Structure formats: structure tokens, C-alpha cells
Image (tube, grey):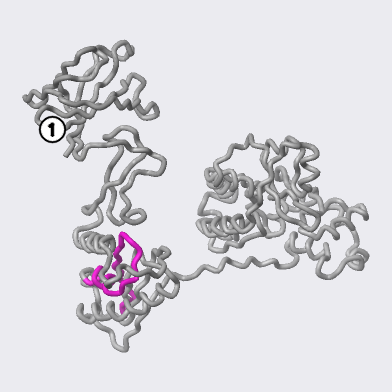
Amino acid sequence: MWWPLLPIERWRRTSGNAPELVVALVEEAQHGQLIVAMTEAAAGGGARRGMRLTDARALNPGLVAVAADAAGDAALVARLARWAGRWSPLVEVDGADGVRLEVTGVAHLFGGEAALAAEVEARFEAMGLTTRVAVAGTAGAAWALARYSTRPSPQGEREDLSGLPVAALRLSPEANHTLYRLGLKTVGALAGVPRRSLARRFREADNPLDALDRALGRKPEPLTALAVAPPPRATLRLAEPVDDPAVMAGALARLAGPLAKELAARRLGARRIALTAWRVDGEVGEVEAETSLPTRDAAHLVRLLAERVGAIDPGFGIDAFALTATWCEPLAAGQDALIGEPARELELARLVDRLTVRLGAERVRRPQARASHLPERASGWRGAVEGEGLDCRAPAGLAMTVRPQRLLDRPEAIGVVYATPEGVPRRFTWRRGVHDIARVEGPERIAPEWWRQPGGTRLRDYYRVEDAAGRRFWIFREGVIGDGRGGAPEWYVHGVFG
């Protein structure tokens, strides 16, 4: 997999700028700043990768230079490589803008090599990354085909490589220049030269024959898998099998301390923990629990799993246990309070965790703000331990005005008296009660969500009103006169202020 436009696509995604801007990403070099990536508009103005910034500005004085972030690009490639583990257990970062996978024996799980390549391209395209994918018998051939091939040849992989330039063999610029001077411009031309006469012209470390042999599979080129840290885990082996639930609970308590220490050493907090028990007859039992906030409190972890230990069938006895944090999040060291008492947020999270373990995740929920302008759709419910923390604020970028403390499940129709058809309400009738309006504020207009609602949906004008008795309501008029979407406007009450 190769992402030829990764630096500029990442910059565009993080900065929110459009591709129409004439921008080039530059880095410091020995003789000035060099361009490492550019937008489509900058490329149309003559900017090229590897060109000096001064030369590019001579062609296009309006070119804007932005410092490249090589460290950020490398971190993104590393994250993408870990994410690509969904297709293969053997993944390797390939330079600054690529990843190599070993798909031998796993391609059939995705419908074959062609279907796998198509899925890879579609997945990364959904992320906004231009991706070129090639599948070959060797890592060198795949690298060359991904970067230099336009379409596969029906004759096979060897014919695909023969027409590629010698730069596809990943040689140094000096070696490429020497081969071009000798007239060897393609891989096929290089393969037809006697090996003995060519070997004397190149150093051992930059021999094109070795690169050719690796691409054709004559020499091995193994992949080195990413170093993935195992999840935090504590194990306990028993001298004799046990089947007493009290002893099993004691094993859990003995494991929680070492697991908490490992979490602290790695500055992590557990969001999901699993207790695994190995029986002497070869069977494995497991129970798990989730937390609403990252934690490494050993007592809290024991409390969460203590009630579920009894669900493990000991059979003829259990001789080994393991407590694993299968889902972790960063958790730096911090002091909860000056007097040593836990913070209220932490106490609430612990209470939610205990209720979830006892009642079930589907029965313990919390409110969740949603990105919608309509009040009845602006909030919902989700599991208490899902997502990140207990933040119930509105999504970023969604400005919320004053809303009533009590919102009705559905708006209720009311009869309204007003001075003019487009004026503010003066009196309304709701639930057999007449309310004379003493104060009114509004309107706040909320347009229909055209991407969700049918075209004939009418807009709403909301008012905050207070009657003569001091009771405050949130009412709205649906539609305006002459909007062409129905008859006379209708009025509803949608909420009550405290």
C-alpha cells in the first residue's frame, strides 16, 4: 500500500483548507527549502516534489509555503499500519508513505487477492487518502508495481516488472544514474545483461542484481512485523486445581494488584478487564466487565468482577488464572483531591460501573447529545460505559440556545390568540387551562432538516413565554402564512421551564 499524497492530504484534513489553495509543504535542506508535497492548484502552477521553493515561486509568485510535519506524517503511517492489521497478522511500515502486508494464506478470507486489494483501496478512500495497492509474490515486486505500474499485464508478474524503470528496484540515485548512462533504463533490459560484467561496476550494498533477485524471488526479503505491545496482564498458576468460588475470588484479588502496577508503569487505565480461568480438562472460562472511565484502582477492579466469578464453571478444577486489560486508554498520574478523597466524577463512574455489572449494560444508560437542530432529536440515550467518559455536553460546533428543563416527549397542540397573524402570542389554551401571556421572548426560528425530513415540512418559530402566574413555557408556531406548505399555522407547546 502506497499513499503518494499523504502529507498534503493529512495537512488538508487537519487544517480544513480546500484543495483550491496554492500551497506547498516544504522542509529545510542543505541549499534551501525543498517542496515535499503540494495541492492540485500548486501543481498546476508548476510546483513539483523535490523542487526548491525559490524556483517554484519564480514560476508562481503566489505560492504559499507551509512547513511540513514529517513526525506527524510518520505517526499517521504507524497508526494506519496498526489499523491494517485487520487484513494480515504481519504488517510492516514501508518508508515514510507506505505499508507492506504479508497476505499469503489470508487473501481467500476476503474473496481473493483482487477483492482484497479493492477493499483496501475503498477503506482508505473513505478516510480521504489516495491509495495505490499492488499484490505480488515478493515484497520488492509489490513495491514496484504499486508505485510504477499502470495496469497488470495478462502475461503475469514477471512481464509487469520488465517494462518498469530501474528506479522500481529501490536503488540509490547514483546507481539509477549509472544504469541510465549504460542504457539500462528498464528492469527487462537489466535482466538481459550478463551478470558477471554488471557486478563489477557496483558496490555490494547497492548492487542492482541483488535488488533484481529480491524482486523476482531469487533471494529472500522477509517482512518484519510491527512491534505490538501485549495488553497488560497478570497471571497466577496454582499448585493444585481449585473449584471453590471463595478461592477463585481470592485469586482475583491476588491478580488485581500486579495488573494495577503494570497499568501504572505503562500510564494506562483499563476500560475493559477479563478474568480467564484454565481448567484441567482443557476448557477455558472467562468473565469480563467494562468501566465508564479509565481506571487502575485494584479494589474497584476486584469489586467489578467479584460477583461474576461464580459464573465460571470450575469443572474438575482450575489450575491457572489470568486478569487482562483488553481495552486500555491513556491515564496519567494525578491527585484527585487535596484531602485524599476521590473526585465526584470518579465516584459517579464507579457507581455506574457497579450498576452496569449488576443490572446489565442495556439497563444502565446516560443521555447523549446529538448533532440536530430539532429539539426532539438533539438528545438520546446510550450505554453508560460506551464512548469516552461521562461527557454529556453538546457536540463541538453546535451552538445550543436556552432550552427548557423539561421537554415533552412530543409537542402538544394548543389554541393561541395573537394580535396579528405574524405577531407574538397573547393567550393560549393547554390541557383545559387558559394562560394569559405576560412576557414573551422570541422568535427563534428552526428550519426543517432537509436531509431527513420530507420537502413539505414546515419551519418552526419558538417563543419563551411567561403567563400571569409566573409559569414559563416553550411554545412554537409551525409554518407561516403563505409558505405554500399547508393551511393556517399551528401552535404547540414543547417544553416547560423550571
What amino acid is found at the position of numbered circle 1 in the picture? Arg
Going 80% across and 65% down the picture, which residue do you hit?
Answer: 210
Q: Is residue 284 visible?
A: no
Q: On screen, 206 above or below 158?
A: below
**Quadrant location, the C terminus:** top left
Q: Name the residue beneath numbered marker 1.
A: 471
Q: Is residue 280 magenta?
A: yes
Question: Of 154 and 38, which appears nearest the observer?
Answer: 38
Q: On screen, 347 above or below 111?
A: below
Q: Is residue 397 magenta?
A: no
Query: Residue 424 appears in which quarter of the rendering?
Result: top left
Residue 137 in the image: state x and y as whole percent.
67, 58
187 sits to left or right of 115: right
208 sits to left or right of 481: right
Query: Residue 71 appears in which quarter of the rendering?
Result: bottom right
What secondary structure is marked by label 1? loop
Going 21% across and 27% down the picture, which residue do you hit?
Answer: 475
230 sits to left or right of 42: left
Question: Of 418 and 308, which appears nearest the observer?
Answer: 418
Residue 338 in the image: state x and y as whole percent.
30, 70
Query: Residue 245 appears in which quarter of the rendering?
Result: bottom left
Going 9% across and 30% down the picture, which residue do you hit?
Answer: 469
Chain part drawn in magenta: 278-306
In this view, the residue farthest toward the left is: 432
Question: Of 44 and 218, which appears nearest the observer?
Answer: 44
Residue 340 in the image: state x and y as whole percent.
28, 72
Q: On screen, 236 above or below 67?
A: below
Q: Is residue 493 visible?
A: yes
